[in-house]
Image: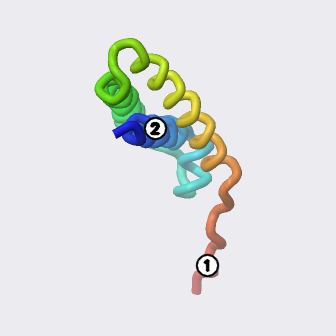
Amino acid sequence: MTALPFLAAILAFVLFGLATDQHHGKRFRRACPRGRAIRLRATAWTLLALAFALSMIAWGAVFGPIGWFASIISGAALAFAALNFIPLPARRPRG
């Protein structure tokens, strides 16, 4: 149960990153359409709220916010590393 807030936070920050034109273009080779960016950000915010609720369930009212804060910090760090440092697969030549 304690791993779920961390996973939700990681996924949320990956979605925040993919909502930007830079990361979306790097991964999907096209700019992120406005509607998709809005949906990605809305889903990311929902996941952060879910991570807060899961933290409160896992660690209680006293340590829940602390666990949530640790989850979002580690989620942001791991998403940053994944989006910026994991190499993209090589493109296959067409034809």
The residue depicted at 62 percent of the width and 43 percent of the height is: 22
* Label 1: how many Cα within 10 Å (few below 14, some 14–19, many 20+): few
For the residue pair 61 and 23, the one nearer the viewer reads as 61
Tally of numbered discs? 2
Residue 21 image position (x, y, % from top left): 57, 41
Could you say whether the residue bearing mark 2 is in a helix, strand or loop? helix
* Label 2: how many Cα within 10 Å (few below 14, some 14–19, many 20+): many
For the residue pair 42 and 81, the one nearer the viewer reads as 81
The label on residue 30 is none
Residue 15 image position (x, y, % from top left): 46, 40
Could you say whether the residue bearing mark 1 is in a helix, strand or loop? loop
Q: Name the residue that disc number 1 marks.
A: 92
Q: Quarter holding the N terminus?
A: top left
Residue 13 image position (x, y, % from top left): 50, 36
Give the left or right position of residue 2, taking residue 22 as reference: left
Residue 88 image position (x, y, % from top left): 64, 62
- The image quadrant of residue 64 is top left
- The image quadrant of residue 11 is top left
The residue depicted at 66 percent of the width and 45 percent of the height is: 81
Alpha carbon separation for disc pair 1 and 2: 35 Å
Q: Amino acid at mark 2?
A: Phe
Q: Amino acid at mark 1?
A: Arg
Q: Name the residue that disc number 2 marks.
A: 6
Numbered disc in front, either 1 or 2: 2
Q: Residue furthest top?
A: 62
The residue depicted at 53 percent of the width and 36 percent of the height is: 75
